[in-house]
Image (cartoon, coloured by chain):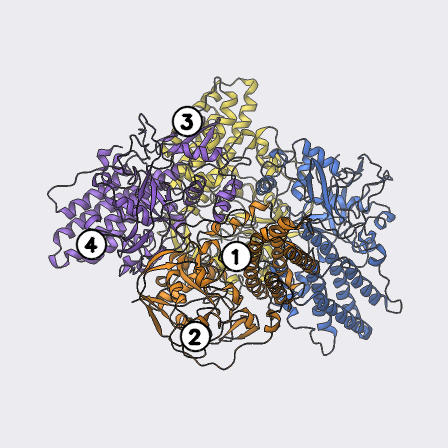
Chain colours: A purple, B orange, C blue, D yellow
Amino acid sequence: MTAQKIAFHADASLSPLAQRFQQLRKQTEALIEPLSAEDCQLQSMPDASPAKWHLAHLTWFFETFVLEKFEPGFKPFNAGFRVLFNSYYNGVGDKYPRPQRGLISRPSLDEVLSYRTQVDERVLKVIAATKKARLAELTQLIALGLQHEQQHQELLLTDIKHALSFNPQHPAYARRWPLAGIHPQPVRWHGYGGGLVGHGFDAAQDGDFAFDNETPRHAVYVAPFEVASRLVTNGEILAFMADGGYQRPELWLSMGWDWVVRHHQSGQPGQTPLPLYWKEQSGEYRNFTLHGLVDLDPNTPACHLSYFEADAFARWAGARLPTEFEWELAARALPAAASQSGNFVENAAFHPLPQQEADHGVPAQMLGDLWEWTQSNYNPYPGYKPWEGLVGEYNGKFMCNQFVLRGGSCATPRSHMRASYRNFFPPDAQWQFSGVRLARDI
Amino acid sequence: MTAQKIAFHADASLSPLAQRFQQLRKQTEALIEPLSAEDCQLQSMPDASPAKWHLAHLTWFFETFVLEKFEPGFKPFNAGFRVLFNSYYNGVGDKYPRPQRGLISRPSLDEVLSYRTQVDERVLKVIAATKKARLAELTQLIALGLQHEQQHQELLLTDIKHALSFNPQHPAYARRWPLAGIHPQPVRWHGYGGGLVGHGFDAAQDGDFAFDNETPRHAVYVAPFEVASRLVTNGEILAFMADGGYQRPELWLSMGWDWVVRHHQSGQPGQTPLPLYWKEQSGEYRNFTLHGLVDLDPNTPACHLSYFEADAFARWAGARLPTEFEWELAARALPAAASQSGNFVENAAFHPLPQQEADHGVPAQMLGDLWEWTQSNYNPYPGYKPWEGLVGEYNGKFMCNQFVLRGGSCATPRSHMRASYRNFFPPDAQWQFSGVRLARDI
Amino acid sequence: MTAQKIAFHADASLSPLAQRFQQLRKQTEALIEPLSAEDCQLQSMPDASPAKWHLAHLTWFFETFVLEKFEPGFKPFNAGFRVLFNSYYNGVGDKYPRPQRGLISRPSLDEVLSYRTQVDERVLKVIAATKKARLAELTQLIALGLQHEQQHQELLLTDIKHALSFNPQHPAYARRWPLAGIHPQPVRWHGYGGGLVGHGFDAAQDGDFAFDNETPRHAVYVAPFEVASRLVTNGEILAFMADGGYQRPELWLSMGWDWVVRHHQSGQPGQTPLPLYWKEQSGEYRNFTLHGLVDLDPNTPACHLSYFEADAFARWAGARLPTEFEWELAARALPAAASQSGNFVENAAFHPLPQQEADHGVPAQMLGDLWEWTQSNYNPYPGYKPWEGLVGEYNGKFMCNQFVLRGGSCATPRSHMRASYRNFFPPDAQWQFSGVRLARDI
Amino acid sequence: MTAQKIAFHADASLSPLAQRFQQLRKQTEALIEPLSAEDCQLQSMPDASPAKWHLAHLTWFFETFVLEKFEPGFKPFNAGFRVLFNSYYNGVGDKYPRPQRGLISRPSLDEVLSYRTQVDERVLKVIAATKKARLAELTQLIALGLQHEQQHQELLLTDIKHALSFNPQHPAYARRWPLAGIHPQPVRWHGYGGGLVGHGFDAAQDGDFAFDNETPRHAVYVAPFEVASRLVTNGEILAFMADGGYQRPELWLSMGWDWVVRHHQSGQPGQTPLPLYWKEQSGEYRNFTLHGLVDLDPNTPACHLSYFEADAFARWAGARLPTEFEWELAARALPAAASQSGNFVENAAFHPLPQQEADHGVPAQMLGDLWEWTQSNYNPYPGYKPWEGLVGEYNGKFMCNQFVLRGGSCATPRSHMRASYRNFFPPDAQWQFSGVRLARDI
């Protein structure tokens, strides 16, 4: 599995839309190259889905929202797939129960790949054949479908990591371990004056696509603040643990402490809770990664932290998590180059990487590496309107009991990220590539 | 049970602090007058507590945080009470498991009332004896203890209502039903210009006490908006139900719809879910209240709605819930008289009352009647610092997965309410006196 | 609380049936004398019921099965009680959910006692007035009602013990601790030849009443066996624990080991599971009893053992549990006096007592002290027919996943016991006065 | 998938033991021929295992209990498999959690088949090389391993049926549907005199192998009884349903009724519970089988009944389930031919078949078709001793809360069955090929 394969080059004779479509669809397939049909079948929890399901569901999206609308004489590839591979669109009809997605051995992986191939060909034909009058609408739907494709590329990786972690033989997704020489960097603080600022998607800066939840752009008052120059590292989490971090309720939210106690009791008696994917072997910490089980590196950003852990660590460190307003303000102040140089999925590192050199006057690792928990709840922006039609179920209905994460990760496609992008997960979620950047008042 | 009893007159020869202490402590005891020792023992869910536990816990608070610090030669009334009646203060030591509070038959109610009497006498002595140098500190702790006392007065009522509702004989807490002649009022809308406004506790307007979570006062930008002139009524909920409100997932948050489905499946097959305490009898709706089972009145504000129901109703009505910033802004614009005239616990109505006459140019029912769900998560204000010491566990640690409610209810003591007051509950909570006031963008 | 009160003397002018009725009904009321109304309200698990519920349900039984049938112009005391105090008789109609019995504060204890008094008076009138033609039927129903009364006398004690055990102040039901000087007795073995024997209720030996589950008497082939001369003691359980009894899966049934693991994980980490009501304090074992928390006595029979513990202990001891056929055969071989001399509830000891003197050629403690687990499942005897009518729900429908216990306990009324009596509980039940007598093949 | 493949012919040059080993090992592999690697990965509930796990576990058994003991210089195929494929032998060491067996994508199916091939070759070498002195011991272990192999052949089929049933496209395991012309047969009754009879394994009648739980042979007294001439059919279950069978608590054990209510509530509201694998489509009943979804045939034996359903049906029919003593007595009275002619797995029918012709004076379908629930608990026979050593965990530790089934099914290998064979499952288990034969007293 190499970076070359992920960054597939599309057929240059196609239209730009068709090229982008072809490129991103192939990128998804490149990600399952290291996996067997049996791997692609695994579902380790209701929140995660089998890789095969991702492959099929992404195709279902184009079949249902593009072909059904734009293809003359549309006939479904397989009528049953409409139910099997619907995720949560109540408007589309019935859906197969999420926790049972791992019980679908048929269609096989091969059949699902054929489904992809056929639908791709039909979408390319539709792109070529659509008249100008409807092209804007088609382009918009395909753009949405490709954003959706990219979201699931990331989920495919975090879900398979979770699934493989149950195998006591610690199988690797990709063998090459990305860590080379490391030059530890101290934390520095970067300050921002705040004030009444614009917040949310801005086409001038953020490109030609945004989800409805990034809009409308609106005024927010932000007090002066500063953020850390890099992500929190494994070594800092070790210091937190050595100071009784997982044993002191005063460091935790009440609900976070309940979560610690629950984890503790379901584990081996007498053991300290560990961050997800950490294992203790003969007194040493080891870390399950997409490259198998490796030694825990103290300079690597700490990942797979829940919001509860992120919040408790920040409290222990005498700091706090940033709000999403602060984060976006800081991200918009980055030089243009920074947003292109992050550790995204196209790196094929599949793991956050240590900060290798001093920052250049701006915070490092803002984009890529790890999603950064903010203290902001995932709420509608003032004046928010969900999209109309079936795709209106995309975002708004999840605005409850979730926290916003920003910046993308080592599993996020590079072109998927922008300063206004809002990811969101419940506070106990750990299986995403999530980490912590500290903030504090000035 | 009459209003006179709740509004007890304290001994006029005492200092103002001592009078207020005596008055509010007696107010709590007045609330259990209609209850037997067996009633006071009931615990119907882990989130609710027995009335006897409330009585004892409130006394534990004064014993632990006041007497232990200020009484020379302090000795506990009963050393075991330190554990038995601690609610959630990890800093104080062990606590008895919350779901088992209903299993404490001993001490008896009589013994708990003696505990109250003795601690009250000792606190009054401490107030009289404390030297000037420490009086400010003592006053502050007693003020906190009395705010705490008032919070539990409300919980005592909502908890006993919940507990009595399990009795198929529908026992009444108080017999007198407060509804008289009703003059239905249409909804009107009141607009506000917004802008960059101050938000949070302001001693000049809000009096001499605030919880840490109401501070610091800070700037917020609010866009123009309008709010409804009154609370949503039972009749409006009936219209929502008639329009398939509980059957249409598109009206609900994803998590809210899961909640509906769960409620539905655990109930009788084929039945429509009903708001809490509604019952269908021979095709008519009846309502369990603190006055027993009564006919459902369409003009009375709809109460015991969860956030999920409030949010779905608002979406169905083409409106939304206000933010807490909007709510506070509107509340601060009320004439001074409005904040004194609400339907609070001292009314002894124990139920929200219909709006009886047209509003006088400002929204009615803002204070008292029902807590109003806002769409704001219960988060720290910028620059928030929890109190120091043990009482620091009071508020901040609950800032997760809860929504803010504003305005107080028919079970809230009048002097407990202020424009900056933030109540908070998880989105599925129904057993508080919670309702809906609609808002919308201009 | 004294033995005198339990053994109430009935009004000698009444008929023998009426006297027995009056005596046993008063015996139940004597058992709640040490309890407050709040104590009588407690329900600590779905399997246990509040004392107040027992008092009311026993009265409901006479009202429903006797008065409703025999009293001219019958009117219920309170129509709602038919649902509230029905236990499990589907034929009678609806029943209130069992896990919520502790939520019924009204009727109060006083009202329930009035219900008892009124129904008792009416039953006595019915007894006096019933014509000869129906007297046999009436006598049979009252006999059943009184057996039922006695069963609940025992449950009332085991349920209140369980409920009080949740109180960290270890309240006592009765203060007087029954243990006097102790003379430890070694185990001896008593052998029986077995063969083809009659099994089940035999009116000639067992008196004038049996439940349907004790019938019909039938032939069983029993191989030669021997049983221990006394019950297993706390000291023997300590030896089992010291030998790793709770850590060695090979000693346990698979389902029993799951039970141990589950208990272990829900308790404090690192702690050895303990028998129910044992507590460790500073390295010493203490025992919660109906007399409060006392030192654990090594010579006292070990009680509150589950079937799983009984079975594992027997395996460890190189023996086994007896079958119910063996137990009954041994019990029928006892001298007549033995069945009268056991430690039953009328002793007011409320706890098993150590064997004080050598056995007289027959096993000691067969009757009273503790129910003895057998390895026999609670199954229908060949040719078993449930009673006809509503009372047919009494026994047969529970014949699944339960084990038979024999011999009665310190909480069983003396006149309730006979050699053919079959008690039954699921293998994880601990809250009855249950213990172990070993058996082995010859 | 044909009968020929299941009945593989072994290499005639091998010793009889080696031939039998080779033949039965191949028979297992023949059963997965219709399955893909993805199918073999499925685990639909903790009680069921993936086909791949069965294949590996069966090999683990020979590797652990035969090769490790008999092969000079033994080295494991893969040391990690010792944990991964241990089922429940605590004596062997750790085991992988049962509910997670479906999460093992690696080793792949191909690798597991290689594991089988290699271990098979090594076992054949060991058979050839073992000296006479140890041959008896080796033969005994291999015999046990092959019995174990056959048990899992059946489980492999019932588990894959359960897993495939979750696929809404109703995939077939084998296409050929075995039902041909049907000649309905009325029920007749066959009587037996009973008396004091020998019960349990008898080498003279039952062959050269028995599990420890079939021993020792012992005397049992059996009263006269009769059994039905055939199994209960789908048509008879339809009559039970039409008569309110699933709505009438009086027909059910108390625990069975709870099970019905639980099933009812978790299903679609308002729907009648159906036997497992029945579906209603437009008012017609359809049946999911290993041949896909087919019309429900009224003359086919009703299968996948739980003990609760079997017991309730028998009560409704005015009969009862046989004891295992009665069943064995009747089975021993069959003519020798009957035990060879049953519908076993070698038929490749994979479903019970209707009785096609009148019985010849003895009950039909006693062997093969369906396991028959008895009312006997799975208990140790008098004098029962578990095998010594690690294999002692095979049977005895499951003797709790299970009922005995007799006679084998359409998924059982023919040579696996004998009159003394005891299968056992908990009363709510449905996924085995289990059915009902009625019995009654004479």
Q: Report crowding for label 1: few under 14, some 14 to 19, many 20 or more residues within 10 A (C-alpha).
A: few
The front one of A375 and B387 is B387
Q: Is residue A211 left or right of residue B376?
A: left
Name the residue carrying label 1.
D262
Q: CA distance from mark 4 to mark 2?
A: 42 Å
Q: Secondary structure at mark 4?
A: helix
Callout 4: residue from which chain?
A
Instruction: Kindly indicate whether the residue at mark 1 contacts the one at mark 4 (C-beta within 8 angstroms).
Output: no
Q: Is residue B407 above or below residue B379?
A: below
Q: Position of residue A355 (x, y in %)?
A: 31, 32
Name the residue carrying label 3.
D11
Name the residue carrying label 4.
A140
The amino acid beneath tag 1 is Arg
Q: Secondary structure at mark 1?
A: helix
Q: Is residue D160 above or below residue B22?
A: above
The amino acid beneath tag 3 is Asp
Residue at the farthest right position = C12
